[in-house]
């Protein structure tokens, strides 16, 4: 009889605790927005909104590059931000591109979003001071290890050893 992990490999997850932690932290940030009566805002929108405030209208490609995201992911995020009434799009410099512009609603809350960003960064710094091994150090160490050997290559090697993959 096969064990639970063999039947359902999702019973084991190294990433799930980190994902839950990040989701809980984002939920707390979004709770701050709710308490401040800022409607339709997701924590995942703030970096892009602040980038647009600082740099002015950008194409989806420019915005994606500025926050190190793919064009596809940014296009989806812009659509969500547009639905929330935080940005609008207009024709870009060529027929294929769109420029992303803050709406009046986003412009009105931009100073508050910048304050929340600073407070969040300060809270993370405070939290890290309580830890023996700060998360930012963990991330830097993981990035360095992945420069030596990519995540893709690590997964591909494990799959090459697994008869179910062949």
Image (spheres, grey):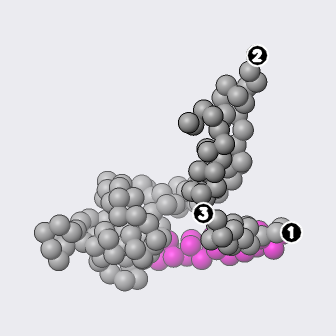
Q: Secondary structure at mark 2?
A: loop
Q: Quadrant of residue 89?
A: bottom left
Q: Look at mark 3 in the image and give the residue it sits on.
A: 150
Residue at the image point whose x is 63% and y is 51% from the top = 157
Residue holding disc 2: 1
* Viewer-closest of 149 and 95: 149
Q: Quadrant of residue 129?
A: bottom right
- Evaluate whether residue 133 shows in this view: yes
Q: Are marks 2 and 1 in contact (CB under 8 Å)?
A: no
What range of the chain is rendered magenta?
110-130
Q: Residue furthest right?
A: 132
Write down the residue under mark 1.
Answer: 132
Disc 2 from disc 1: Cα separation: 42 Å
Q: Nearer the viewer, mark 2 or mark 1?
A: 2
Q: Are marks 3 and 2 in contact (CB under 8 Å)?
A: no
Screen quadrant of the C terminus:
top right
Vertical placement of 72 versus 143: above or below? above
Report, in whole angstroms, how far the alpha carbon at label 3 lies from the one at label 2: 35 Å
């Amino acid at each position: 009889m096969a064990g639970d992990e063999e039947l359902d490999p999702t019973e084991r997850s190294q990433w799930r605790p980190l994902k839950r932690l990040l989701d809980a932290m984002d939920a707390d940030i979004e709770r701050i927005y709710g308490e401040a009566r800022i409607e339709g805002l997701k924590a995942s929108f703030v970096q892009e909104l602040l980038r647009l405030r600082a740099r002015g209208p950008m194409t989806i490609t420019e915005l994606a590059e500025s926050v190190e995201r793919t064009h596809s992911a940014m296009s989806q995020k812009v659509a969500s931000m547009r639905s929330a009434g935080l940005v609008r799009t207009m024709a870009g410099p060529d027929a294929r591109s769109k420029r992303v512009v803050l709406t009046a609603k986003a412009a009105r809350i931009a100073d508050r979003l910048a304050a929340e960003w600073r407070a969040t960064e300060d809270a993370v710094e405070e939290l890290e001071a309580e830890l023996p091994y700060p998360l930012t150090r963990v991330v830097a160490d993981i990035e360095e290890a992945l420069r030596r050997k990519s995540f893709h290559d690590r997964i591909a090697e494990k799959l090459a050893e697994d008869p179910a993959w062949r």
